[in-house]
């Protein structure tokens, strides 16, 4: 690992993290897959603090995708139970000037959970120290289709007068990540090298860092390593 100091300008403004490898971590220890998720949730909480300590301002964690429902019922239930358990911890961040957003389609959740998610978002709405996004029932394609539907509705209702006036910037106002800058750095531990339908619009010019560490073993050193890799990249955004 290189050891140069990271300046504020070198840090990603928005980091995305795919918390992958929980199942393999558990298997290596002959534990049930759910034990990997339990450890993964602890690492999630610590990594939020680590991002803040480094000075990153926006972090989106992939907690549950629109495709994860295909997993065995017991596993889905265990992840949901964990998420519900952690909602108090997530809400507690709002006392530290953290804004919390749950990108994803909340309509599938029972009313009590859905209302709790909305309540946490609303309580923290005016916080501006750090934006914590926890993607739940999130799919990038679903997000874009949802945006297209809402644009069509607004056109029908006359809120949008002229279709040709719709710009990329305006389109972004219909995404779950409205108001949050696009992703600069996407980190995926566990050795897999794909995006898995995560923030596909927002990652148009993201830098990717894939790492061999499994998510439950992910440390501040790994986060710093990913940020140093990012700092070395030459971003041209299609220019020269
Ligand atoms: C991917 O690892 C992980 C998930 C699909 C679930 C992530 C959930 C958590 C970390 C816990 C809850 C989160 C919060 C925010 C409290 P995998 O199971 O696909 O691992 P594998 O590829 O090794 O099987």
Image (spheres, grey):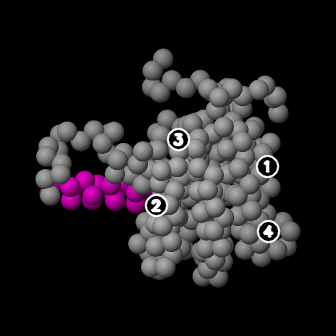
Q: Residue at x 70, y 32 (%)?
A: 229
- Return the mark for residue 122: 2
For the record, the magenta segment spans 138-156
Q: Residue at x 66, y 57 (%)?
A: 19
Q: Residues within 10 Å of mark 4 (few under 14, many from 20)?
A: some
Q: Earlier in the sequence, mark 1 or mark 3?
A: 3
Q: Earlier in the sequence, mark 4 or mark 3?
A: 4
- Return the mark for residue 26: 4
The answer to whether residue 164 is left or right of residue 30 is left
Q: Quadrant of residue 134?
A: bottom right
The answer to whether residue 86 is left or right of residue 238 is right
Residue corresponding to mark 1: 219
The answer to whether residue 50 is left or right of residue 160 is right
Where residue 206 sits: x, y (%)?
54, 37
Residue at the limit of the structure toward the top, as seen here: 240
Q: Residues within 10 Å of mark 2 (few under 14, many from 20)?
A: few
Q: Which element carries disc 3, helix, strand or loop?
A: loop
Where residue 178 sits: x, y (%)?
40, 48
Q: Residue at x 72, y 28 (%)?
A: 6
Where residue 108 sits: x, y (%)?
44, 75
User: Distance of mark 2 from mark 1, alpha carbons?
Assistant: 31 Å
User: Distance of mark 4 from mark 2, alpha carbons?
Assistant: 36 Å
Residue corresponding to mark 3: 183
**Mark 4 CB lies closer than 8 A to ligand 1:** yes
């Amino acid at each position: 690992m290189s050891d140069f100091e990271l300046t504020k300008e070198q840090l990603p403004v928005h980091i995305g993290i795919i918390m992958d490898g929980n199942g393999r971590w558990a298997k290596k220890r002959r534990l049930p897959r759910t034990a990997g998720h339990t450890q993964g949730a602890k690492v999630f909480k610590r990594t939020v603090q680590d991002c803040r300590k480094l000075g990153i301002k926006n972090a989106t964690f992939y907690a549950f995708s629109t495709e994860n429902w295909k997993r065995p019922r017991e596993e889905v239930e265990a992840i949901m139970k964990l998420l519900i358990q952690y909602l108090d911890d997530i809400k507690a961040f709002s006392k530290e000037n953290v804004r919390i957003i749950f990108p994803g389609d909340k309509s599938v959740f029972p009313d009590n959970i859905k209302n709790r998610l909305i309540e946490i978002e609303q309580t923290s709405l005016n916080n501006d120290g750090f934006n914590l996004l926890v993607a739940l029932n999130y799919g990038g394609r679903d997000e874009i289709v949802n945006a297209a539907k809402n644009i069509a509705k607004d056109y029908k209702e006359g809120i949008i007068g002229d279709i040709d006036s719709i710009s990329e910037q305006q389109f972004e106002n219909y995404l779950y990540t409205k108001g949050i800058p696009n992703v600069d750095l996407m980190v995926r531990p566990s050795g897999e090298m794909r995006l898995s339908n995560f923030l596909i619009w927002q990652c148009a010019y993201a830098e990717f860092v894939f790492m061999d560490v499994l998510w439950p073993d992910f440390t501040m050193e790994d986060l710093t390593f990913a940020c140093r890799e990012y700092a070395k990249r030459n971003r041209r955004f299609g220019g020269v």
